[in-house]
Image (cartoon, rainbow, N blue to C red):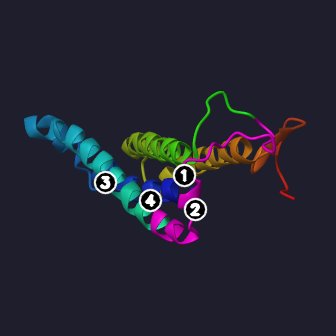
């Protein structure tokens, strides 16, 4: 979740600054300005990959002190686990799949943040559009990860905040 929040904060102002400085009309009339959109999108994706890599390196540095290397070849399915997986994954394979999923989610949120940044009129609108999307995504993530209702649940036609025991 912290990775996604940092990606949203870093990548969001990419295209908004041009709109606020009234440069979009000038950029789109020039031949080099039209290719600038692709260059900014590529720079946003590269910065996303750098941010995610740096944060994962820090998190795995902290995780290395847990001394869980002895469990890397252990399978995560067991009789004591409540839900069985289709694949017989080892712990290290589960970690690698989780890392790939973090990169995919970060790239998806980066593209979403850049697209919202290209249509938002100012920072307040940008935050107003991205905040509900992020809250919905995090509540879906909590629901998927913890098996409970997320941050907000739909009951009786209204979103209500859920309590976590």
The residue under label 2 is 68
**In front: mark 3 or mark 1?**
1
Estimate the spatial distance between the alpha carbons at disc 4 and disc 3, rounded to whole Å: 14 Å
SS at mark 2 in the image: loop
SS at mark 4 in the image: helix
Estimate the spatial distance between the alpha carbons at disc 3 and disc 1, rounded to whole Å: 31 Å
Percent of width and height locating residue 130: 54, 48
Percent of width and height locating residue 57: 41, 63
Percent of width and height locating residue 16: 35, 51
Q: Residues within 10 Å of mark 1 (few under 14, many from 20)?
A: some
Q: Quadrant of residue 77?
A: top right
In the orientation shown, which residue stands out farthest toward the top? 86
SS at mark 1 in the image: loop
The residue under label 1 is 72
The residue under label 4 is 56
Q: Mark 4 vs mark 3: which is more N-terminal? A: 3
**In front: mark 4 or mark 3?**
4
Percent of width and height locating residue 157: 85, 35
Q: Which residues are magenta?
A: 60-83
Estimate the spatial distance between the alpha carbons at disc 4 and disc 1, rounded to whole Å: 18 Å
Q: Answer whether residue 144 is magenta in the image.
A: no
Q: Mark 4 vs mark 1: which is more N-terminal? A: 4
The residue under label 3 is 47
């Amino acid at each position: 979740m912290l990775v996604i929040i940092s990606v949203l904060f870093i990548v969001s102002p990419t295209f908004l600054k041009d709109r606020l400085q009234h440069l979009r009309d000038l950029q789109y009339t020039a031949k080099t300005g039209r290719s600038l959109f692709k260059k900014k999108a590529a720079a946003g994706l590269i910065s996303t990959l750098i941010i995610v890599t740096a944060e994962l390196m820090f998190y795995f540095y902290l995780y290395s002190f847990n001394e869980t290397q002895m469990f890397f070849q252990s399978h995560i399915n067991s009789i004591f686990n409540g839900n069985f997986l289709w694949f017989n994954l080892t712990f290290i394979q589960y970690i690698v799949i989780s890392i790939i999923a973090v990169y995919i989610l970060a790239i998806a949120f980066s593209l979403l943040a850049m697209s919202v940044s290209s249509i938002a009129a100012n920072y307040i609108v940008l935050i107003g559009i991205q905040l509900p999307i992020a809250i919905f995504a995090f509540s879906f993530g909590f629901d998927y990860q913890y098996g409970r209702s997320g941050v907000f649940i739909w009951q009786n036609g209204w979103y209500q905040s859920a309590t976590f025991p």
